[in-house]
Image (cartoon, coloured by chain):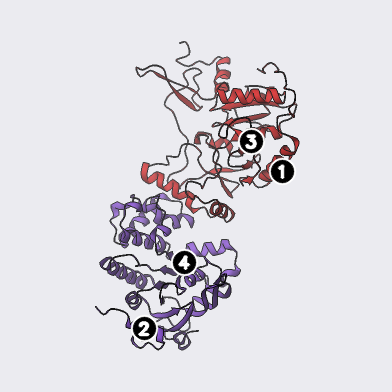
Chain colours: A red, B purple
Amino acid sequence: MAEAATPVLDGYNFAYLDEQTKRMIRRALLKAIAVPGYQVPFASREMPLPFGWGTGGIQVTASIIGRDDTLKVIDQGADDTTNAVSIRRFFARTAGVATTTRTPEATVIQTRHRIPETPLAAGQIIVYQVPIPEPLRWLEARETETRRMHGLADYGVMHVKLYEDIAQHGRIATGYDYPVQVAGRYIMAPSPIPKFDNPKMDRSPALQLFGAGREKRIYAIPPHTPVKSLDFEDHPFAVERWTRRCGLCGAGDSYLDEVVLDDAGGRMFVCSDTDYCAGRRADGHTGEDAGE
Amino acid sequence: MTEAAACGIDGVDTGLADPPLLVADGVTRWYGHRLGCRDVSFRLWPGEVLGIVGESGSGKTTLLDCLSGRLTPSDGTVTYRTAGGETVDIFSRPEAERRLLQRTEWGIVRQNPRDGLRMGVSAGANIGERLMAAGGRHYGRIRALAGEWLERVEIDHDRLDDRPTTFSGGMQQRLQIARNLVTHPRLVFMDEPTGSLDVSVQARLLDLLRGLVARFGLAAVIVTHDLAVARLLAHRLMVMQQGAVVESGLTDQVLDDPQHPYTQLLVSSVLQA
């Protein structure tokens, strides 16, 4: 369901950024795609929203979007939260592009914290907003040293983190921003998506771009690139599972949010991906809480 | 080349047919106009412990950093014979290879355990790090080995999941030693391993080190300003003053019959207990 065209603002270049800036970002993107998982520094610009709200993702989207593109923006899986609505409207007004909430109709998807449940297809581009691009940051504070570790593939310390998880919690307790190794080389932070979404990155036919505005880094996973989540032989990588199904559409295979309904312990589980949930309901699926 | 090395008397049965493990040739390090160490040459054979003594500021740590590949010398070469029998010039090799050596075949025990440990993760993770860096991917086995080494350095097994911040200074130092020895290095560099520890802890640590060195046939280069430590651990001794080696030889020979005026001063200034 494409939204009605919003009048394009006068006085702004197409998609807000000037052409020289887009050129600089595209160069960084090309390098990032050529070296999968490698963090390419770029000259991040001031954007009309604070760092941490998606400035990296917006700059990447602005640099790759064309007049024929259809944009979808999601925040925590939802199309209708403040962040998603404002970024979508930002591009509708500065670029005049069509927007959608339907995953299969979108050519560019900007996301924060989720990958859509509907599998991405060849030709689609997904742009991630990234707060901390450096997966080694919590273990090694020095940027000079982390760069060297990436350069030399000196990654032993990454497993120290997972070891520590198991020692303290009995299992790998890292639930989001779960580190991955891209194409057998670079260790990469997948941005704060739940580890539930990690397998979707592996050999995805879509192009995946990551933009970190505050940290001034861009990285990428080209289509069909192997992406492996780190693990131990005796503690293999596994995604979260729920004993419940989505209360609205009855889906048993999607990432569920727990919603507190009242102060008497009432709660329901719903799909975090609103488009996926709406699509299933349109197809006639219902969950046990759907009538309320 | 030192006299002892030239004669081949090492104080231990290393076999003269063996080629040396580590050869330093004219190692010199300048910090701008200031001298770190000058023209140091020696050979170290497998299983041998070399002590480097000298006063504070005499270039001991600079030399150790150069030998262990952490500091590039201004002049001179350091060559090492790998487990595969290959002789490599440490500083002409790419850094990736040097780091691989550092985390597989070498151990580096720092003077301050906080520099050599990861204080934010548990003791087990500290010991396991080298195993994981070397490709260990089996949690159970890594943990079992970490526990074994913790006991080997006389720390209770139930401290395995405690952070080093909760350990005493002596325990931290022992943990650092366990962390370095877990991958069975062939050569260990130690910078004042017993500095800042009280005397009884020092004695236990020395005992432990002596046992480990003998048991695993380690070669070691130990920097210390403490002649008693040198006497106990080192087979051979190099005395440094103002960046240069002024005397070297078998430990007992150097300490009992010092030839150089500075060594004589050093030996005579030790309080006799």
Q: Residue at x 31, y 65 (%)?
A: B197
Structural distance between the alpha carbons of marks 3 and 4: 48 Å
Asked if badge 2 and badge 1 are on a common chain, one would say: no
Number of other residues with Cα within 10 Å of mark 3, as a class: few under 14, some 14 to 19, many 20 or more: few
Q: The disc numbered 3 marks a residue on which chain?
A: A
Asked if badge 1 and badge 4 are on a common chain, one would say: no
**Residue type beneath disc 2:** Leu
Between residue B168 and residue B242, name the one nearer to us.
B242
Q: Which mark is residue A46?
A: 3
Vertical placement of residue A91 versus A161, above or below: above
In primary-sequence order, the first of circles 2 and 4 is 4
**Pair 3/1: label in front:** 3
Q: Residue at x 44, y 79 (%)?
A: B240
Structural distance between the alpha carbons of marks 2 and 4: 34 Å
Residue B237 placement (x, y as % from top left): 40, 80
Q: The disc numbered 2 marks a residue on which chain?
A: B
Q: Which residue is mark 2?
A: B265
